[in-house]
Amino acid sequence: MGFLSIDLGTILFTLLNTLILFLGLKHFLFQPVQDILAKRQEAVDQTLKDAAAAKERAEQAESEYTEKLAAAKEESTAMVRNATRRAQQRSEEIVAAAKAEAAGIMKQNAEELEREKRKAESELRAEVSGLAVLVAEKVVGREINPDDHARLIDEFIDSVGDAE
Amino acid sequence: MQIMANFAVPKILEGPTELSVDGANIIASFKLFGITINFTETVVLEWIVIAVILGVCAFLTRGMKVQGVSKRQVIAEMAVETVTNLVRDTMGKRWLFFTPYVATIFCFSIFGSLISLLGLRAVTSDFSVLLTWAAITFILITATKIRFGGIGGYLKGFADPIPVMLPINILSEVATPTAMALRHFGNIAGGSIIMGLVYYGLASLCRMIGLQIPILTVGIPAVLSLYFDLFSDFMQAFIFIMLMMVFISNAGPSEEETA
């Protein structure tokens, strides 16, 4: 055959052979490699998806814990505040009770003192009036009606007491 | 010469004693519907090439795994990804289905050319082979134009920009695949002729200076073979698929217009 001849048989067979090689390459090279690549991509996607899910779970847990922690903190603060308030209340009550008691005792003491004072006063008055009558009798030399004079003397003592 | 022929030098060691530039030999010939169909050397070589390529592919992709990848699998994956990326970069994403065809032509061309290293005829030094591939490219270009522009748009394209351009447009339409086929064929066939000439010339030189065994043909042609066989084979295969991809993808609207 000539060097530059165009041969119909060769063209037809070449066409057929090209088709065979095309299908062969697809079947023996591209199909398996693309399958593997697709599978690998799938595996990578799955891994990424798992990682994303795990991350989401972790974030959720974190926010949950943060929330719980905040709630606990708030609770403890409230407890401390409550306890403080109660303690203060209690101390105030105690102080108030103590004050009341002290005031009661003071008042009692003052009353008693007053009573003692009154008693002493009346005793003193009786004694002084008796003495005065006695002195007056001695001075006047005669008996004085104690009742008449007792009034006078009382008046006198009262005026002296006022002057004091 | 006559005296030296008395020494028994095996025929195989004599080197080329004549140079002929022939096409492929016809192995068989049969008639189909009155048309003579030749079964040539080229077709048998194509089968060898196909068997080698598919054998390599089957070997590379055997027992592939998702994890714990073997070296063979890495090579297979790299090959597929390289071609895929080349198609994506040259033609665009929507032409990705084209990848196996590009790989087919590239493998067929490069292995078909490299078979000459084994002393066989290069498949690609048969013009009919390149013509077939160019015809496929022409059909794909035309199909793409019709697909995106309709038959009306395709026919109108010939009278663009003015009807006077009609003959020139038809010529350029035909020139595209013809040029592709001739470029590839010319490079490989020319390379093989040059290599044949070099072998023949060196053998003749040896005979002239009285060497019975053409020692000069050892080594010296290998340097030239690096270019004419290895480099040229690879370049032509690459140029062919690049032109094919560019012409076919240019026949349709660009990616941005359709996106």
Image (cartoon, coloured by chain):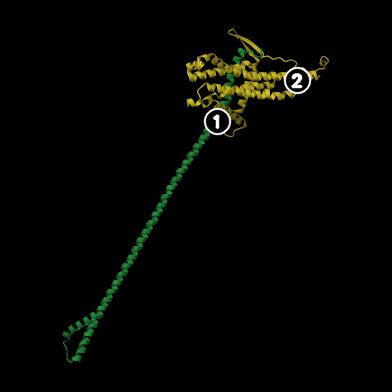
Chain colours: A green, B yellow
Q: How many marks?
A: 2
Question: Toward the viewer: B125 or B73?
Answer: B125
Q: Is residue B123 visible?
A: no
Q: Which amino acid is tagged 2?
A: Leu
Q: Is residue B80 visible?
A: yes
Residue under pointer 2: B202
Residue under pointer 1: A37
Secondary element under disc 1, as helix, strand or loop, is helix
CB atoms of marks 1 and 2 within 8 Å: no
Spot occupied by residue B185 in the image (x, y as percentages of width and height): 63, 18
Task: Please say if B193 is above or below B74.
Answer: above
Task: Choose mark 1 or mark 2, whichever is in front.
Answer: 2
Question: Toward the viewer: A41 or B124?
Answer: B124
At label 2, counting other C-alpha atoms closer than 10 Å, the crowd grade (few under 14, some 14-19, many 20 or more) is many
Residue drawn at point x = 34 percent, y = 64 percent: A94
Q: Which amino acid is tagged 1?
A: Leu
Q: Is residue B167 left or right of residue A131?
A: right
Quarter of the view holding residue A95: bottom left
Residue drawn at point x = 51 percent, y = 37 percent: A48
Secondary element under disc 2, as helix, strand or loop, is helix
At label 1, counting other C-alpha atoms closer than 10 Å, the crowd grade (few under 14, some 14-19, many 20 or more) is some
